[in-house]
Amino acid sequence: MFVGGHVALNLVNTVAWRLDPARREERLPDDDALRRWAEAAGFTVVADGGVTEVRELREVAHRVLEPLATGAEPGDVEPLRRLIVGALARAEVASVVPLEWRIPVHGTRDLRDALALETWRLLQFEDLTRLCRCADDGCGRLFLDRSRNGSRRWCSSADCGNRERARRHYQRARR
């Protein structure tokens, strides 16, 4: 389920087959799906009708992150900046070391703000030269390549990687 290597990327990846309109699938169709995803991602939240706001953050983040993953210039960062600034305005600083911004998550707006802060952390602290898009033509998932030599091509070796290996095997067998 989580292949991005960072919670902000896992959020962006909640649209399956983003690059293939025929297979594109929304993985956060409703509040219950959002609650299940959030719990699996380590957040405790009561979904309270805010799935639309979380999906808005997801799409705004995707418009900035996807070009970075493909070596292009990022899209308009202003909508993402506004969401991050709004989240920081509602955040608090932990009272223990390490001192870091945090948002206690109770409802969906808190979840959106916490995810906006995670997106900021990704952009601020991660090595964005390791940000990649899956090599499968239709997949579109983003991930941080944490392999030693930076050679990871697939969001998941067991999913997209296996499909590509099977395709190549089939083509070789046909010859």
Image: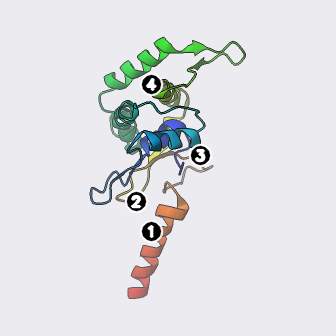
Q: Can residue 26 be seen in this view?
A: yes
Q: How far apart are marks 1 and 3 (CA)?
A: 21 Å
Q: How far apart are marks 4 and 1 (CA)?
A: 39 Å
Q: Earlier in the sequence, mark 2 or mark 4?
A: 4
Q: Do the residues labelled 3 and 2 touch (CB within 8 Å)?
A: no
Q: Mark 3 points at which residue?
A: 146
Q: Distance between the Cα atoms at labels 3 and 4?
A: 31 Å
CA gap between label 1 and label 2 equals 8 Å
Which type of secondary structure does the marked residue at label 2 adopt?
A: loop
Q: Mark 2 points at which residue?
A: 136
Q: Residue at x 49, y 43 (%)?
A: 10
Across and down, in percent, residue 29 comes to 37, 45
Judge the density around disc 4: few (<14), some (14-19), many (≥20) Cα neighbours within 10 Å.
Answer: some
Q: Dot 2, how many residues are within 10 Å of its Cα: few (below 14), some (14-19), or many (20+)?
A: some
Q: Considering only vertical position in the picture, is 70 above or below 108? A: below
- The residue that disc 1 covers is 164
Q: Do the residues labelled 2 and 4 touch (CB within 8 Å)?
A: no
Of label 3 and label 4, which has the lower sequence position?
A: 4
Q: Distance between the residues labelled 2 and 4?
A: 33 Å
